[in-house]
């Protein structure tokens, strides 16, 4: 990815990483920053939701660990969607994906990534989510 991924108006795309494991959080931030993204970091679900609330107009994608302290990934997901219903979310988990999906149900603009993952998989998932159009409001 030479030059990083840019939005339509040539500003950096912002990602919020909500991850309690410091090594994963810092390494992921470094990879995204090197690839041209603006990165926000949170170490637990509550901090992530508050950071998102402050910067919702800037953040395009949230990378959300499923197993977090203070507020679980599922709880944080629902709070993020209450703030911005069309936020794109990548849920990461080391647990069974079937269990995670059953907790959330089928939601638009959500991807699931099994840990451990390669950074190339993560970037491709971000690109795929950004390519998805936002769902249109229903008029019924």
Image: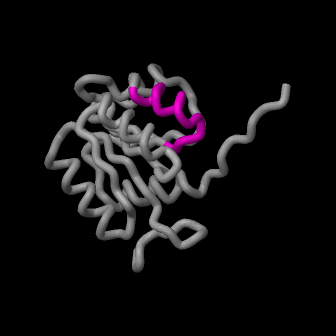
Residue 126: give x, y in percent of width and height: 46, 55
Task: Tell me: residue 30, above or below residue 50.
Answer: below
Question: In the current view of this chain or complex, which residue is farthest to the right?
Answer: 140
Of residues 66 and 138, which is closer to you in this image?
Answer: 138
Of residues 10 and 125, which is closer to you in this image?
Answer: 10
Q: Quadrant of the C terminus?
A: top right
Task: Tell me: residue 83, above or below residue 59.
Answer: above
- Total numbered labels placed on residues in the image: 0
Magenta segment, which residues? 76-88
Question: In the current view of this chain or complex, which residue is farthest to the front?
Answer: 54
Kindly identify the residue that appears in the image at 59 percent across and 57 percent down: 131
Residue 45: give x, y in percent of width and height: 31, 30
Specify the quadrant of the image occupied by residue 136.
top right
Left or right of 102 on screen, residue 139: right
Left or right of 132 on screen, residue 115: left
Kindly identify the residue that appears in the image at 45 percent across and 66 percent down: 12
Residue 67: give x, y in percent of width and height: 27, 28
Answer whether residue 82 is magenta in the image. Answer: yes
Kindly identify the residue that appears in the image at 50 percent across and 59 percent down: 127
Task: Tell me: residue 113, above or below residue 122.
Answer: above
Kindly identify the residue that appears in the image at 38 percent across and 69 percent down: 36
Left or right of 39 on screen, residue 19: left
Q: How is the image coloured?
A: one colour
Residue 48: give x, y in percent of width and height: 34, 37
Answer whether residue 30 is magenta in the image. Answer: no
Prevailing secondary structure of the magenta residues? helix
Specify the quadrant of the image occupied by residue 33.
bottom left
Q: Quadrant of the N terminus?
A: bottom left
């Amino acid at each position: 990815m030479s030059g990083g991924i840019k939005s339509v108006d040539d500003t950096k795309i912002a990602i919020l990483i909500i991850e309690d494991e410091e090594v994963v959080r810092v390494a992921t931030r470094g990879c995204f920053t090197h690839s041209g993204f603006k990165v926000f970091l949170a170490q637990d679900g509550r901090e992530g939701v508050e950071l998102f609330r402050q910067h919702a107009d800037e953040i395009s994608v949230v990378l959300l660990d499923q197993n977090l302290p203070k507020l679980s990934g599922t709880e944080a997901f629902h709070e993020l969607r209450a703030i911005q219903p069309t936020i794109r979310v990548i849920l990461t988990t080391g647990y069974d994906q079937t269990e995670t999906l059953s907790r959330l149900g089928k939601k638009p603009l959500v991807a699931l990534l099994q840990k451990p993952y390669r950074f190339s998989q993560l970037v491709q998932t971000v690109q795929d989510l950004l390519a998805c159009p936002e769902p249109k409001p229903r008029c019924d």
